[in-house]
Image: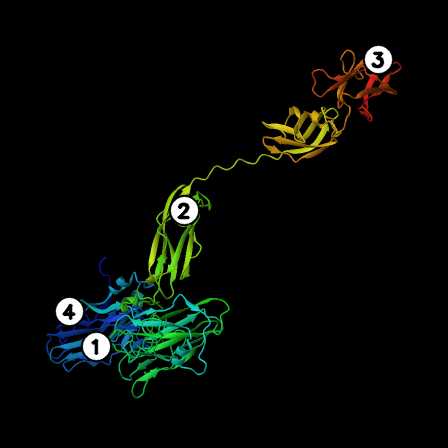
């Protein structure tokens, strides 16, 4: 892209029709372009001159003259919006002389109305000078090293429209340049315990001798004459507003009352930049740079007492210091240019001493500096200071002073060339460790760095643990793939340390498909009751007998029931019931731990009681001799044999029966029921004399043990 041109339009307005005596010559338009500070809100623009000749002697030039600009005109005005600061001068042959016509300011224009000048010899010259404009509004915000070249290509132009014959319609009235560059501790002053001189009051040389900690600030003008002294019609010369913040509560700051610049007899220097420690010396009237502290200025750098260069006979030692008042660790000071050489680009540096009796914990303070007074008044005003500036942070001055690679400046070193990380799609889950970027200051000074994330694919899927830091440190980089599908994503991580360097690290994120969700956990296997299979009541169980387990989620493709780890024989399984034969190996035990396992999921162990015998007759488990089920519709009679089917009668026990009141009936058969696992069959003859409804009881007596008898089972006799 070619140079960028911004026009300042000048319209020269005269009546459309002239009397016979109207001026009808030809005008040559010239200008005196000057450099203007891009920070300036009241920058004086170059003069515009109209050299008009060729008219008849004695003709009159009458009408109004108006200049239009792309920024506001900011000269000092009165209550009628008139200014005497901008001047229209007339030359009718004896040289330029100011006219009595005031300028009328309206936003971005200034008019000189009621022109009425004779051209005795047929020629007349006009010059407009002293117009001020808010050129800061033409500058990209904020100014950076990257856009500085573009800013310097901006030419402030004046375009003239007039019924007069002009040799050219456009002239340059200004070139944009930075007024202030600097070296300062904008991001960090490391605070530590620092002594004050032993005696008070003390001077600059005493602070040097005491070894009081300091941090130097260097101010360099962007072009010769940018550091101007107070001019006629101005409230102040170029000022510098220095702000401090973040100091511990017990801190005291001291700065020189006057600072000798780079071309002074002895420049002031703190010793931490390009010159050894020195108390400045200034020769009065030498037109060398000297800054003087402004007492009484407000926090914008405005107001206060007028300053003057140090006076006296011979070189003046600038050895006095004074304190910067702090409130909650913050404060400010204001310097003003009291003397300078407008033909030489100058700089000045001053140390800020910080006296801190003790530091209980590490602290990092900071400072900022800008041209001052700082003001948001972007239009002509009756009260706003002239000169005034926008609050732009200065760019570094190391390029102008050719010391960017000096050891007292920081230098960025980043030990990382690329980063590869992985994640799971649509989640924050990473499949790798986060990216790691070590950062080091490879030189001196204080390295302030920040992190910039840029995306070539998508956006917003990276985050870091630290977005900025001082000196040595590290940054870890995580991914957030919540909104990302499977694929490869590209980004860069830039560690930017300004003039100390920057490094861009490519990053690749590989996002994998989410694994299938794990199968749902099997439902919990729960045992609610363990029952006798014959009576479906909770009774002690007998080894080899039948039992029923009641619960939930008992069924499955693979089901087992164990007693103390021994597997039972399963006869029936469903989701809520299992019928089984108690393992014979439990014989002789009084209790056992039962566990049901269904498809790999096991129940909580249930403790069951065991007995040597526990006869239990099945419902409908008593048959007559003809194999009919005994009951009211099918009674039996004395002499017939009842077939009783029960469980809980192990082998080796003595079995007896009772029918009604006749006890100790000896079975005609007692043993396993043929073909029925875990079922015993007892055949008993009905004794004589038994009739009607009677209770049938079976008893089993182990050798040397007690008798275990069943509950009564009603039989019907006839």
Taking 334 as reference, is 174 left or right?
A: left
Q: Residues within 10 Å of mark 2 (few under 14, many from 20)?
A: some
Q: Quadrant of the C terminus?
A: top right
Residue 13, x across and y down, in percent:
21, 70
Sooner in the amino-acid sequence: mark 3 or mark 4: 4
Q: Which mark is residue 421?
A: 2
What's the mark number on residue 166?
Answer: 4
Residue 115 has which mark?
1
Apparent side of residue 693 relative to residue 447 in the rendered image (left or right): right
Comparing labels 4 and 1, the label whose residue is closer to the camera: 4
Earlier-in-chain disc, 1 versus 2? 1
Mark 4, Cα crowd under 10 Å, few <14 / some 14-19 / many 20+, is: some
Q: Nearer the viewer, mark 2 or mark 3?
A: 2
The reply to whether discs 1 and 2 touch (Cβ–Cβ < 8 Å) is no
Real-space Cα separation, disc 3 to disc 4, in angstroms:
150 Å
Q: CA distance from mark 2 to mark 4?
A: 68 Å
Q: Are marks 1 and 3 in contact (CB under 8 Å)?
A: no
Residue at figure coordinates x 74%, y 24% from the top left: 534
Nearer the observer: mark 1 or 3; the answer is 3
> From the viewer's perspective, is 627 left or right of 64?
right
Tag in front: 1 or 2: 2
Q: Is residue 263 visible?
A: yes
N-term mark: 2 or 4: 4
Q: Which residue is mark 3?
A: 637
Q: Position of residue 132 (x, y in %)?
A: 28, 73
Distance, label 2 to label 3, CA atoms, is 92 Å
Is residue 77 or residue 18 the one in the foreground?
Answer: 77
Q: Quadrant of residue 129?
A: bottom left
Alpha carbon distance from label 4 to label 1: 18 Å
């Amino acid at each position: 892209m070619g140079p960028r041109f911004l026009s300042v339009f000048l319209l020269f307005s005269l009546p459309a029709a002239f009397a016979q005596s109207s001026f009808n010559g030809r005008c040559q338009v010239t200008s005196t372009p000057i450099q203007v500070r891009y920070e300036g809100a009241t920058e004086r623009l170059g003069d515009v001159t109209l050299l008009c000749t060729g008219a008849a002697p004695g003709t009159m030039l009458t009408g109004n003259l108006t200049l239009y600009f792309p920024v506001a005109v900011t000269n000092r005005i009165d209550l009628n919006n008139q200014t005497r600061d901008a001047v229209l001068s007339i030359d009718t042959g004896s040289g330029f002389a100011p006219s009595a016509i005031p300028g009328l300011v309206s936003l971005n224009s200034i008019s000189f109305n009621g022109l009425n000048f004779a051209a005795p010899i047929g020629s007349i010259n006009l010059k407009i000078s002293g117009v001020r404009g808010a050129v800061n509004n033409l500058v990209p915000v904020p100014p950076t090293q990257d856009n500085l070249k573009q800013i310097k290509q901006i030419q402030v132009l004046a375009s003239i429209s007039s019924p007069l014959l002009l040799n050219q319609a456009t002239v340059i009235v200004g070139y944009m340049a930075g007024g202030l560059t600097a070296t300062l501790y904008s991001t960090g002053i490391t605070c530590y315990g620092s002594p004050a001189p032993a005696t008070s009051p003390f001077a600059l040389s005493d602070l040097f001798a005491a070894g009081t900690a300091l941090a130097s600030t260097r101010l360099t003008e962007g072009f010769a004459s940018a550091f101007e002294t107070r001019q006629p019609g101005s409230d102040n010369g170029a000022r510098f507003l220095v702000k401090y913040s973040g100091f511990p509560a017990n801190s005291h700051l001291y700065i020189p009352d006057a600072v000798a610049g780079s071309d002074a007899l002895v420049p002031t220097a703190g010793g931490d930049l390009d010159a050894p420690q020195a108390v400045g010396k200034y020769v009065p009237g030498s037109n060398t740079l000297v800054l003087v502290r402004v007492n009484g200025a407000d926090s914008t750098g405005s107001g206060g007492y007028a300053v003057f260069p140090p006076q006296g006979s011979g070189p003046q030692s600038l050895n006095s210091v004074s304190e910067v008042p702090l409130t909650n660790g913050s404060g400010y000071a204001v310097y003003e240019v009291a003397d300078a050489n407008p033909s030489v680009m100058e700089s000045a540096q001053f140390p800020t001493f910080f006296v801190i009796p003790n530091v209980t914990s590490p602290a990092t303070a900071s400072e900022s500096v800008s041209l001052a007074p700082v003001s948001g008044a972007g239009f002509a005003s009756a009260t706003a200071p002239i000169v005034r500036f926008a609050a732009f942070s200065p760019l570094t001055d190391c390029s102008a002073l050719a010391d960017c690679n000096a050891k007292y400046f920081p230098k960025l070193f980043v030990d990382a060339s690329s980063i590869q990380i992985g994640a799971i799609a649509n989640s924050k889950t990473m499949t790798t460790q986060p990216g790691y970027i070590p950062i080091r200051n490879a030189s001196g000074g204080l390295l302030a760095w920040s992190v910039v994330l840029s995306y070539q694919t998508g956006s917003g899927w990276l985050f870091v643990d630290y977005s900025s830091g001082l000196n040595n440190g590290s940054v870890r980089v995580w991914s957030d793939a919540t909104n990302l599908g499977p694929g490869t994503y590209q980004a860069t991580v830039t560690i930017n340390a300004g003039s100390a360097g920057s490094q861009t690290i490519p990053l690749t994120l590989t996002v994998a498909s989410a694994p299938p969700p794990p199968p749902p956990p099997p439902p919990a296997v729960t045992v609610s009751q363990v029952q006798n299979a014959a009576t479906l009541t909770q009774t002690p169980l007998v080894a080899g007998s039948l039992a029923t387990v009641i619960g939930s989620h008992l069924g499955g493709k693979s089901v087992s029931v164990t007693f103390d780890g021994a597997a039972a024989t399963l006869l029936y399984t469903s989701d809520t019931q299992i019928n089984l034969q108690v393992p014979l190996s439990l014989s002789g035990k009084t209790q056992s731990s039962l566990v049901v396992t269904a498809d790999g999921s096991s129940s909580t162990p249930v403790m069951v009681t065991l007995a040597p015998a526990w006869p239990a007759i099945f419902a409908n488990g008593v048959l007559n001799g003809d194999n009919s089920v005994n009951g009211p519709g099918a009674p039996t009679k004395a002499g017939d044999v009842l077939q009783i089917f029960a469980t809980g009668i192990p082998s080796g026990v003595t079995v007896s029966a009772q029918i009604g009141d006749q006890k100790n009936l000896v079975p005609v058969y007692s043993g396993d029921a043929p073909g029925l696992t875990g079922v015993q069959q007892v055949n008993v003859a009905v004794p004589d004399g038994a009739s009607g409804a009677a209770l049938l009881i079976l008893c089993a007596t182990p050798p040397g043990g007690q008798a275990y008898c069943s509950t009564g089972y009603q039989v019907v006799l006839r």
